[in-house]
Amino acid sequence: MLSIKGINKTYHTEDGDEILALTDIDLTMEDKEFVCFIGPSGCGKTTLLRIIAGLETPDSGTIFLNNEPIKKPGPDRGMVFQEYSLFPWRTVQKNITFSLELKKVPKAQREDISRRYLQLVGLSKFANSYPHELSGGMKQRVAIARALVNDPKVLLMDEPFGAVDAQTRNRLQQELLKIWEQERKTVLFITHSVDEAVYLADRVVVFSSRPGRIKETIKIDLPRPRDRTSVDANMYRERLLSSLGAEIENTID
Amino acid sequence: MDLGHGPRKRILELASIASAVVIWEIIARIINIKYILPSFTSVVTAFIGLVQEGELYRDILASLNYFVLGMGLAIAVGIPIGTMMGWFKSIDRAVDPIIEMIRPIPPLAWIPFAILWFGLTKYAAGFVIFIGAVFPILINSYTGFKNTPRVLVESGKVLGCTRNRDIIFRIALPSALPSIATGIRVGMGVGWMCVVAAELFGVSRYGIGWKIWHWNDLHHMDMVLTYMLVLGLIALTIDRLFRYIVQEWWLKWQAGLVV
Ligand SMILES: Nc1ncnc2c1ncn2[C@@H]1O[C@H](COP(=O)(O)OP(=O)(O)OP(=O)(O)O)[C@@H](O)[C@H]1O
Ligand SMILES: [Mg+2]
């Protein structure tokens, strides 16, 4: 179980301004739950994800993973960044085995494990390719495999499919759900797309902006596999859109 | 601009060189004073003679010896210092003013001290070459490290790469390699230019630079020109070889041209 308790975070810019990024964030996630974060730009979604990853420290509040407080990055949390983040000097396979090398896993075993994850993301044929030879969608699939190889309890994903075209995006979403069903991780997924949130999430957390806080949490009670075009899916989309719409109007005011 | 591929491009290159040679020969024959402009044919004759006597071979070896000494030291000093400055802000602040003081001094101005410290030895020549080559290497290593993409460092951290040493060697260094390669390439260019001057003060009786002055004193301008061309050809060979190694092997992972 991942619990976020009373998180506050203020950024101090170089000109001495203070940016209140997050205020009083409380949230609990069950094991193997798929949660989407959605909200206006700049409301602190990435900041929260980075705090959970251990890349940023909150001003106050604590995050507990199975009752252990989180202070720094650790193998129990994997992360997929919005930008392409593969190591360009390593082949696909060597990217995937990076964390295993650090853990001094023997070579033969590393190769076995990487083969399994390459298969999982459908890129077995590209084991020896370099990242610059891959398409955007393929890069993100490798990044997912690289994060999974550590066998983390929680997978943190920051708009991982933001930069790929709509068709590829739909396919990647399907694949991600398939992986999630096989691997059964807790997934925390930031998105700007209402459609993506309704298709993927067990629960959608809507953020409000300035200062960033949780506005509401909406449970998506749809059976899987989900039909994007169903009446119910549409209802959820409208519900999210109106919740977000109010937020975006607030931001403009 | 595309000038054609493979053989067609080669033909154009060869034609260009051939016509330059022909024009040179014609002008040399019109002037007809060997001392002002030796002809192509006289240079070829001189070159063949030098190769047959085995003299050229010894000169090249001597020059390469100084070059390797200077470059080796420049790499061994430039990369670590550039790394430390690029990675640790406090070291950057402490060392940068000193570097900025020394860097603008032309390498040749160091010759008096080179001789004073090392005598008339190959180490004195190597030192001048080192001074010429070390700054491009240092500064490019520095920029390479400084520009390590943040997302790569953070990816490493979440994958368990948290010790400073691991981050430097497994992430920052490989990420800085293209920049370091550029530094070495530029450094080799400057270092090779220093060879002529470094040999000028007579650390040995062999060496391409030394021979240029030697034959100049004897007014054998065909020899001078021959050695000049050899100097250029070797620089070209070193540069091409380095680029080949970098592209085919060292930095194969990069898209497109590297350095
Ligand atoms: N390193 C930083 N220094 C100063 N301010 C920052 C920093 N990182 C983020 N911020 C500010 O904190 C706020 C929240 O940023 P964050 O990136 O978490 O938003 P977000 O919800 O992920 O936005 P988006 O949807 O556009 O990605 C923004 O106003 C941003 O300008
Ligand atoms: Mg963000």
Image (cartoon, grey):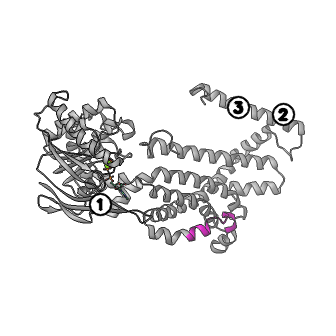
Report whether residue A115 is seen: no
Against B107, residue A252 (above or below) is above
Q: Secondary structure at mark 2?
A: helix
Q: Which chain is mark 3 on? A: B
Residue at the disc numbered 2: B26
Dot 1 alpha-carbon crowd within 10 angstroms: few under 14, some 14 to 19, many 20 or more: some
Dot 3 alpha-carbon crowd within 10 angstroms: few under 14, some 14 to 19, many 20 or more: few
Q: Are marks 1 and 3 in contact (CB under 8 Å)?
A: no
Which of discs 1 and 2 lies nearer the camera? The answer is 1
The CA distance from mark 1 to mark 2 is 73 Å
Q: Nearer the viewer, residue A14 or A96?
A: A14
Q: Position of residue B18 (x, y in %)?
A: 72, 31
| Figure quadrant of the N terminus of chain A | bottom left
Q: Which chain is mark 2 on? A: B
Residue at mark 1 shares a chain with residue at mark 3 = no
Dot 2 alpha-carbon crowd within 10 angstroms: few under 14, some 14 to 19, many 20 or more: some
Q: Which chain is mark 1 on? A: A
Q: Secondary structure at mark 3?
A: helix
Q: Name the mark on residue B16.
A: 3
Residue B107 drawn in magenta: yes
Highlighted range, magenta: B97-110
Q: Position of residue B192 (x, y in %)?
A: 63, 54
Q: Main secondary structure of the magenta part?
A: helix
